[in-house]
Image (spheres, helix red, strand yellow):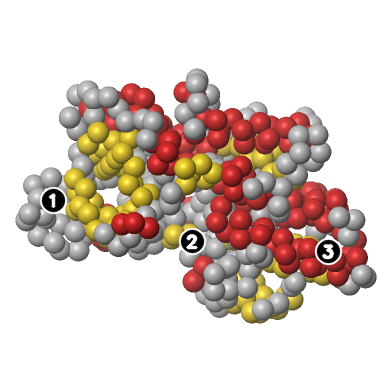
Amino acid sequence: MSRIVILGAGISGHTAARYLNKWVGKEHEIIVVAPNSKWNWIPSNIWVGVGQMTEKDVTFDLAELYGKTNVDFRQAKAVSVHPDGSADSAKPFVTVEYTRADKAGVVENISYDYLINATGPKLNFGATEGLGPDHGHTVSVCTYGHAKEANEKEANEKLQECIAAMKKGERKTVVIGTGHGMCTCQGAAFEYIYNVDHVLREAGVRNMARIVWISNEYELGDFGMGGVHIKRGGYITNGKTFAESLMVERGIEWITRAHVKKVEAGKIHYETLDGTFHELEFDFSMLIPPFAGVGLKAFSKAEEDITAQMFLPNGFMKVDADYTPRPFMEWSAKDWPRTYQTPTHRNIFAIGIAFAVPHLISKPMQSANGTPINPTAPRTGMPSAAMAKAVAMSIRDMLNGAEKPTHTASMSEMGAACVASTGSHILKGTAATMTVFPVVPDYEKYPEFGRDIDLTFGEIGLAGHWMKYLLHHTFIYQAKLRPGWSLLPD
């Protein structure tokens, strides 16, 4: 019997766990290690953050679910990886520290035959002074806890205060976007801003609100994917035009090419690509933080620190990508990982946000002062699930005798969809729906636009809203391992 340890129980970690449980759970041991007690469907945190869904709608208890399977769940955070064992252990192991209340602080070494790093990101609010819900002046929807706090303690309270003031004739400013020059996940902020706009319209005070989008994108519609050309209504347009039209229609202002340097109570300080510095006053703000690795360390058998061999300086784990330094224009789609196996150890994989990308998709840029201002590559949602399933299939086959990974899921060969929906009511609301194929542009295969224009399109309307509503319930149904879950698309 072999033991498979999965670090993390988000979209990628839980996807890997449920498929491995289905395929090999009766013959082999599966352990999931995650610091949180609940699974969270992150895309719907947007609705929690505006008071249209509750924590119960977007989460469920992991221990309860895994207790019905062959998966052993440990509520703990991974601290270090020992891929060659130690003087006291011939087998490789991970060191974890329990976060569950009754075992808080207890440290344990868990040996493994296969390891999947699906730890996700550290939400690096500390990269910008004054950013975030804990020690700063902005709210967040990155986790259900943040979204719940945003709804019940901060965002909803502040929104209601703003709405009450606007009803009395006072104008208020709402600022939403990215809180650092190197942020990713613009899509979450992009959807949130339209939901706030929707809530204000329902309250009848939208005319009293100034809503501002602030982003590190060079142009609107970049989303960390180097921009995109889409087919819409039989015509080809670019993401910039598509995104700008949405904002113009709703009276939303935008600031791009911006790095938020500091947030004070009611004031955002930011630098733009031309090297100038600006201030923007606000009454309510939700800014996405930059991501970093969770801080896993790696040690050799002799207890030497080998973290730099297995991780990039940003804390993300190296996999089968080409990380050779070279100018941006010399990178290609072929440099992206396919199997997510680490180059140093055949039994270790990294998926979701935990793997290190080889290069930016959007062109790297610096301000006149040398400050990097450009979105980093997205790899959440559909890509995370696809690579998790591929790695699960590879481990299944390797357990059955395969010498190397048997399945691939390169982001340069897969598509993704983004549905930015307003409102959670099935008969009310609208959505901007965009699909891209592939996520990482391949100019050798698609020389004109880098993507298959027949599979890259955008639409606006109620149908997309229905799709988002359906996806919310479908993916939670699937994640809960309800009957027929494996027949549903990931």
Marks 2 & 3, CB-CB < 8 Å contact: no
Question: Mark 2 to mark 3: distance in Å?
Answer: 30 Å
**Which of the pair 273/47 is nearer the observer?**
47
Question: Which residue occupies the extreme right position in the image?
Answer: 169
**Closer to the eye: label 2 or 3:** 3
> Is any atom of residue 439 visible in this view?
yes
Question: Which residue occupies the extreme left position in the image?
Answer: 87
Disc 2 secondary structure class: strand
Q: What residue is disc 3 on?
A: 163
Q: Residue at x 34, y 42 (%)?
A: 73
Please state the horizontal and vertical placement of residue 281, each as a whole percent of the image: 74, 76
- Whichever of labels 1 and 2 marks the residue nearer the N terminus, that label is 1
**In the rendered structure, which amino acid carries the disc numbered 1?**
Gly
**In the rendered structure, which amino acid carries the disc numbered 2?**
Leu
Disc 3 secondary structure class: helix
User: Residue 344: which disc?
Assistant: none
Crowd around label 1: few <14 · some 14–19 · many ≥20 (10 Å): many
User: Residue 85: which disc?
Assistant: 1
Q: Residue at x 88, y 60 (%)?
A: 205
**In the rendered structure, which amino acid carries the disc numbered 3?**
Ile
Kindly indicate the quadrant of the structure image that contains residue 459: top right
- Whichever of labels 2 and 3 marks the residue nearer the N terminus, that label is 2
Q: Residue at x 6, y 56 (%)?
A: 87
